Image (cartoon, grey):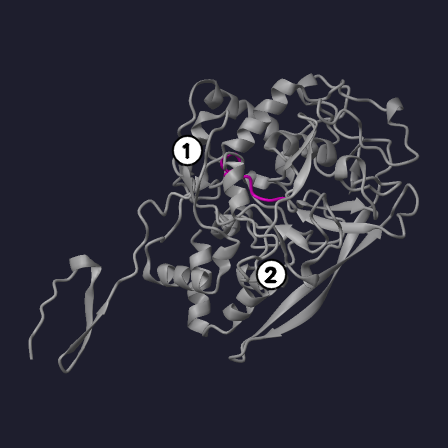
Amino acid sequence: MIKKRILFGLLGFVLMNCKKDEQILYVPLSAETGEELSGGEVTSFDISQNAFGFSASNLEGDDALHFFTGNSLFNQNWVTSPASTTARDGLGPMFNARSCSGCHFKDGRGRAPKFDGELNHGLLLRLSIPGTGTNGGGIGDPVYKGQLQDQSIPDVETEGGFRIEYTNVEVKYPDGTEVTLRKPKYHFTNLKYGAISSSIEVSPRVANQMIGLGLLEAVPESIILSFADENDTNSDGISGKANRVWDVASQATVLGRFGWKANQPSLRQQVAGAFLGDMGITSSLFPDENCPDGLDCSTLPNGGSPEISDENLDKVTLYSSTLAVPARRNHDAREVLEGKELFTKINCTACHIAKMQTGSHKISALENQTIRPYTDMLLHDMGDELADNRPDFLANGNEWRTQPLWGIGLIQTVNGHTQLLHDGRARNIEEAILWHGGEARQSKEDFMNLSKEERVQLLTFVNSL
């Protein structure tokens, strides 16, 4: 018998076992170089309660200065006109929050309300009726328009509110482990301006964490489209497609990138849309006030036309674009690496694509970065159980944009909860996986068929992102 000697570390091999004259060699799992840098150079190493609130360290010149002005505009409350602070007046007349941070607390993720009537929790209801509106978008409710707003300025009646009724859904793993999911149903309350449409389509939307948004905007369109396989030509059951949406600034239909259904083309339009829909603040992109049918907004105080200047809108957009992505934790720990392998094995990476490269962007700090967002930015059918049955441009009622996973393990630290999915129904990562259906059904079933130890490894990996 010829003995073979193998040095530890040689070519990454470790001697694990020897049976007679046969040696079994094992290649140890290892992290990729730079894998902990989820945002490339736009990565922060602070993992405290403020983990989502740091600027890209490579910001330079005016961009670095404007970040702090944008931070102020993002976090401070807007007030009703007239007011001494003309830069922040014009709130309402209808609104869901008084500041951007009212929904994105500490630049983080909102949640479902803890009790009926709770305000500023970070979940709102989109409204539409069947049909296609101007430029391919949806048609809002005839009375309450595109979004239910549960707050109003003094002497103006609020549109109304909603409550959530949860029913339990029992899930049993093949190994006998049981998990109870909760399924929400929404009920309108105290509607003040008349009945809502009998054909109303309702979509609850939780405010997401703000990290890495500019990096996603800097990913070239060609890369995003390269992930698409709308007709499932490779027969893997995954058929991601791009949304095509209306860009107000260019007056053209372009690729959708942001929002739960990729219904916004740019971060600037996303920010302007939130100012109008969430706070009732008009801009050059959206100059008309949100008003329910029957209320004459022209008689109510406003903060000018528009209520946020292009200069300030651009600063909030820059702030939202350049919030750094927290670095991975324990990215090279054995259990995390084993979970990463399982995540790939059950094909979660078909939609949650780990790594891509940014291209050009008007903010130079975002350019040419290797990022690890774990998304393809595309729409996927997630099954009937998660459907809101509300189309949004090319997205149908079952389709949702793949949620980026970077930062997911720090939501508990920053926001004190772990509610996930578009409506916050999932109370942790495991429940979110168990709600997956449609194109993700097979991956969900493969997850359920893992051993308990393997499921823990996979969840540990996701929590490290």
Q: Is residue 85 visible?
A: no
Q: Secondary structure at mark 2?
A: helix
User: In the picture shown, does residue 56 fall above or below 113?
Assistant: above
Q: Position of residue 78 (x, y in %)?
A: 69, 28
User: Would you name the residue on which mark 2 appears?
Assistant: 439
Q: Nearer the viewer, residue 123 or 138?
A: 138
In the image, what residue type sits under mark 1?
A: Asn
User: Is 208 in the magenta?
Assistant: yes
Q: Which residues are magenta?
A: 207-216
Q: Position of residue 303 (x, y in %)?
A: 75, 20
For image coordinates 72% across by 43% down, the residue present is 393
Q: Secondary structure at mark 1?
A: loop
Q: Which quarter of the image is occupied by the N terminus?
A: bottom left
- Residue 432 appears left or right of 283: left
Q: Position of residue 336 (x, y in %)?
A: 38, 59
Mark 2: give few (<14), some (14-19) or many (20+) Cα within 10 Å.
many
Q: Nearer the viewer, residue 11 or 450?
A: 11
Can you name the residue that lies furthest to the front here? 233
- Magenta stretch, main secondary structure, is loop
User: Would you name the residue on which mark 1 appears?
Assistant: 368
Res. 98 image quadrant: top right
Q: Nearer the viewer, residue 427 or 378?
A: 378
Q: Is residue 82 visible?
A: yes
For image coordinates 55% across by 47% down, the residue present is 415
The residues bearing labels 2 and 1 have C-alpha atoms spaced at a distance of 31 Å
User: Is 306 in the magenta?
Assistant: no
In the image, what residue type sits under mark 2?
A: Glu
- Residue 177 appears left or right of 330: right
User: Between disc 2 and disc 1, whose residue precedes?
Assistant: 1
Q: Position of residue 315 (x, y in %)?
A: 57, 23
